[in-house]
Every structure is written in structure tokens, then in C-alpha cells.
Image (tube, rainbow, N blue to C red):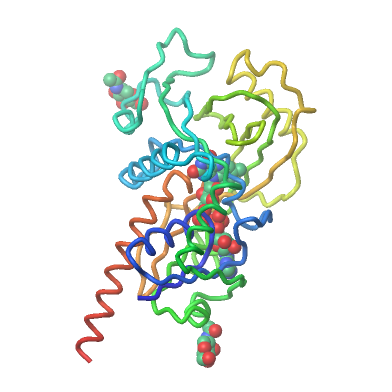
Amino acid sequence: MEVGIIGSGIIGLLSALTLTDVGYKVTIVARDLPGDDSQDWASPWAGAAIYPHPDSGGNSLQRENFRYYWDLAHRDPTSCGVQAIKATEYYDDRDNDSSIWYKTVVPNYRLIHREDLPKGSKLGFTYTSMTLNPEILLPWIQKQLQARGVKFIRRALRSIEEARNITGARVIVHASGLGAHTLADDKNVEAIRGQTMFVKTDFAETKIHQGSHYTYVIPRPQTDGAIMGGVSQPGNVDRNVDKDLRVDILQRVITLVGGELDSVRLKDVKKDIVAYRPGRKGGFRLEAEGNTVHAYGFSGLGYVYSYGAALRVRELVDSLCSREKDRGSRL
Ligand SMILES: Cc1cc2nc3c(=O)[nH]c(=O)nc-3n(C[C@H](O)[C@H](O)[C@H](O)COP(=O)(O)OP(=O)(O)OC[C@H]3O[C@@H](n4cnc5c(N)ncnc54)[C@H](O)[C@@H]3O)c2cc1C
Ligand SMILES: *[C@@H]1O[C@H](CO)[C@@H](O)[C@H](O)[C@H]1NC(C)=O
Ligand SMILES: *[C@@H]1O[C@H](CO)[C@@H](O)[C@H](O)[C@H]1NC(C)=O
């Protein structure tokens, strides 16, 4: 069966991978493709770290996803740009780990004693996770897909029907991120502004603070630096770098890491990044509607859900296609 996919971000690409794994013939239509560095899509700009999230739901998707990236990091880290790394999470909005459902999923989970927590944190723990470089991972997936015969068509679409016309496929996977605001006429879709910096450093762990502020350092595999952030600004569409925010972020990261990054200065910033998370009020959408499978709205956790979401996309496509086949055999 033929399937068309709208979008070649991490969600569209991994959906193409799970579908071609079982023999579907896939065509991808997208405005932005791997290698493009426009601010119009999210995937190239993620840190990116695989931090499962305690409160955002879809835990089974996150669990399957963690296993997938763990496997990539241990199979061929150099080619795919995914690397295992020591992760530390701090929170100031909870004081015990009863909400940390993934403590039994991630390797080497360890609670940090209260007296060892940095000032301002009420909960902290470490485990082994993954960091990835989207500039390596996205083209790596694209190359595998092309080897399997997947066609990529660059086109800005005005409707999902247009994608059906272009690909000739009856079933469409709709993974357009923020594009869903118009393509699915979904007014719950909203851009959430992020600002980060790529900074020269040999710091080799990933750390995050969540709660009253959102601060992180994420080493980028196969570079000489790390992504430092961040901020979460729903509704802010300013595409320019906020200068005050750079100073604030660096200060927060230095406080978060405590000591090891004290010597980092703004002059070590090699690149400023302003990008938009494809948010959705009420959470991500992963369901079939007619002959369309929607997969969007993953906000700041697209990589955390991606492979789990792609497996679910395949289940939904399977059931649409068996319905189509039944209909065909009755004719
Ligand atoms: C600063 C920042 C840091 C982040 N850090 C992390 C992190 O550490 N971990 C994590 O898991 N996530 C992180 N994220 C979130 C992550 O980047 C996104 O959730 C993820 O990339 C979303 O992928 P997607 O495929 O849904 O959308 P996108 O990557 O936005 O892709 C959308 C695709 O649809 C196409 N498209 C859209 N509209 C149309 C149209 N009309 N016609 C044709 N094509 C169209 C686009 O061209 C593109 O190909 C971060 C995001 C930001 C901004
Ligand atoms: C853990 O914290 C939650 C609130 O975040 C609270 O409801 C619960 O009682 C706490 N559990 C323990 C064992 O302290
Ligand atoms: C799809 O193709 C048909 C036939 O060529 C055309 O009439 C229709 O306008 C197209 N629809 C869209 C949305 O592009």
C-alpha cells in the first residue's frame, strides 16, 4: 500500500521508517527538508536530549522511544549522532520522586540526597540517557529512507487533500508540526518560542532544572560544544535574539552546573538560536480522522515521543489500510 506523509521533521521521518519497515511504499511532501536551517520548522533546533517527562502523558510511547534511541546510541553512535550520556534532573515544584514514572525504565537511576541538592532544588536524580545532534540524525534517517525508495518532494501545501493529489496515496500521515494550525484547521496549535545558545565547551553531561524556571545544558555529539537554554514563551513570535535573555540563560546554566562552567563567557557563544516548539493546548494529537493519521503537537518533547509516536502511526495506518482492503474485496 502507498502512504503519503506531510512533514519531514523527526515525526514524519521516523513514521516513514516504521512504515517502510513493514513494506509500505512512502512519499514525503514537505516545505522544509533535512539540511534546511530555516526557523519555520522545529527539528533542527532541538538540543536535543531524551528527557522523559513526568507529567506530559503517553508514557508507553516515551518508554518505547527511550529503548529505540538507547539502541541507536549503542549500535552506531558516530553515524547517527546519538550518544549515551549521564543525565541529571532537578525540580523545585516537587520534593519526592513519586511522579518520576521512568525511574524503573532508565538505566542507573539514582536519587540525589537532599543535602547534596543545589540551592533552590527540592528533588534531584541522575541516570543514563541520550543526547543527539539533529544535524547528523535527520540526514542519517533521510539517507536510509532514500535507500528504501522513499521519495522526498519539496512543496508548501495549502491542504491535506493537495498531498493526496501529489503523492497519489489514499492514506496520509499528517506530521506538519505548526503547519497543523492551517492544514488541520486546529486552533489549539500554538508556537512556543525557545531561545538557546551553542557554546564552546568540553562539558560532557546533560543537566536540566524544571519548575519555576527551565534551564539546561545539552552537549551536542561530534561538536566542541553544548546547547544552553532555555525559555518557554507561548505566543511570542519574535524571531530575533533577545540580548538580555542570553545573559540570563548563561547565568542560570552556570548556577545549575555549579563550578565546572564558571569560566564560560558570552564570547564563547558560537551561535544564537531562536526557534518554535510545535505546541498544542490539550497535548499532542495522535489519531485517525477519515483517511488521515494526525501526528503533531509534540511541543518541546518531539524527540522524547518520536519513535513511540511513529509506532502508533503505523498501527493507525495498518487499521485504515485493512479497512480499505475490506472495502476493496467487497466491490
Ligand atoms: C529550542 C528548542 C529546543 C528543543 N529541545 C528539545 C529536546 O531537547 N528534546 C526534545 O525531545 N525536543 C526538543 N524540542 C522540540 C522538538 O524540536 C520538536 O518537538 C520536534 O522537532 C517536532 O517535530 P515535528 O516533526 O512534529 O515538527 P517539525 O520539525 O516542525 O517539522 C514539521 C514538518 O512539516 C513541514 N510543514 C509544515 N507546514 C507545511 C506545509 N504547509 N506544507 C508542507 N510542509 C509543511 C515542515 O516543512 C517540516 O518538514 C526543542 C525545540 C526547540 C525549539
Ligand atoms: C510526594 O509528593 C506529592 C506531592 O508532590 C505528595 O502528594 C505525596 O504525598 C508525596 N509522597 C511522599 C511519599 O512523600
Ligand atoms: C486534486 O486534483 C484534482 C484533479 O486533478 C483537482 O480537480 C483538485 O482541485 C485537486 N485538489 C487539490 C486540493 O489540489
Residue in the picture at 36% in, 71% down: 289
Q: Residue 300 appears at what percent x and percent y?
A: 52, 45
Q: Nearer the viewer, residue 5 or 235?
A: 5
Horizontal side of 251 relative to 142 (left or right) equals right
Picture quarter with the C terminus: bottom left
Q: Is residue 186 above or below residue 141?
A: below
Picture quarter with the N terminus: bottom left
Horizontal side of 274 relative to 287 (left or right) equals right
Residue in the picture at 63% in, 32% down: 226
Which quadrant of the view contains residue 263?
top right
Q: Residue at the far left: name it.
A: 330
Q: Is residue 230 above or below residue 15?
A: above
**Residue 178 visible in the picture:** no
Horizontal side of 172 relative to 241 (left or right) equals left
**Residue 42 visible in the picture:** yes
Q: Residue at the far bottom: name it.
A: 331
Q: Nearer the viewer, residue 178 or 157?
A: 157
Horizontal side of 69 relative to 9 (left or right) equals left
Q: Is residue 234 above or below residue 32?
A: above
Q: Residue 120 appears at what percent x and percent y?
A: 53, 17
Q: Nearer the viewer, residue 129 or 178?
A: 129
Q: Residue 185 appears at what percent x and percent y?
A: 50, 69
Q: Residue at the far right: name it.
A: 267
Q: Residue 191 appears at what percent x and percent y?
A: 58, 53
